[in-house]
């Protein structure tokens, strides 16, 4: 009986998806086909041009560039790293493009865009 319970615990630990969300309230845009996002320790939340968060630390666009350069310098061995970008539904498209450019300039080639499922 203990073996069966142990196997079930292992199964659920391996097959579960963990989502790390900082304590920033966003109105995420809806998507008809949102994907599950795996656990990552880097989340960029875009609220406005002067309000960008790397995890829970607030930056402007230039500060975000410097912070990502520091993260990239610390983690040269662990490339490629996953990063999640979440933006409020009212954020301008050009700001999201600027954030993605900052990611690309710092060596982050893949970013997952977080959305919420349509009702």
Image (cartoon, rainbow, N blue to C red):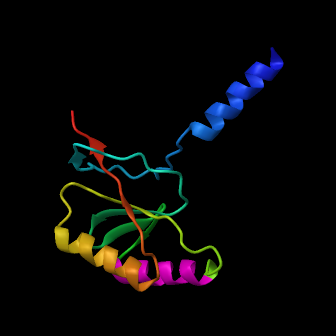
> Which range of residues does the magenta coloring cover?
61-73
Quarter of the figure with residue 63: bottom left
Compared to residue 17, the image places residue 68 above or below, namely: below
Left or right relative to 11: residue 67: left
Compared to residue 8, the image places residue 71 above or below, namely: below
**25 or 13: nearer the viewer:** 13
Secondary structure of the magenta portion, mostly? helix
Residue 65 magenta-drawn? Answer: yes
The C terminus lies in which quarter of the figure? top left
Residue 3 magenta-drawn? Answer: no
**15 or 46: nearer the viewer:** 15
Q: Position of residue 24 (x, y in %)?
A: 39, 53
Quarter of the figure with residue 50: bottom left
Compared to residue 114, the image places residue 72 above or below, namely: below
The N terminus lies in which quarter of the figure? top right
Residue occupying the far top of the picture: 1
Left or right relative to 101: residue 40: right
Q: Position of residue 84 (x, y in %)?
A: 42, 60
Q: Position of residue 83 (x, y in %)?
A: 46, 64
Left or right relative to 23: residue 80: right
Q: Residue at x 18, y 68 (%)?
A: 93
How many numbered badges does the structure rendering display?
Answer: 0
Q: Position of residue 38 (x, y in %)?
A: 50, 51
Residue occupying the far right of the picture: 2
Left or right relative to 55: residue 59: left
Q: Residue at x 63, y 80 (%)?
A: 74
Q: Residue at x 22, y 42 (%)?
A: 32
């Amino acid at each position: 009986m203990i073996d069966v319970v142990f196997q079930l615990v292992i199964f659920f630990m391996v097959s579960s998806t963990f989502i790390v969300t900082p304590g920033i309230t966003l109105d995420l845009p809806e998507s008809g086909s949102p994907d599950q996002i795996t656990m990552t320790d880097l989340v960029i939340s875009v609220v406005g041009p002067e309000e960008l968060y790397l995890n829970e630390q607030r930056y402007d666009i230039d500060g975000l560039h410097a912070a990502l350069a520091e993260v990239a310098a610390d983690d040269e061995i662990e490339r490629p790293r996953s990063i999640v970008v979440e933006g409020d539904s009212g954020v301008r498209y050009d700001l999201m493009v600027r954030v993605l450019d900052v990611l690309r300039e710092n060596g982050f080639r893949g970013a997952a865009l977080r959305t919420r499922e349509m009702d």
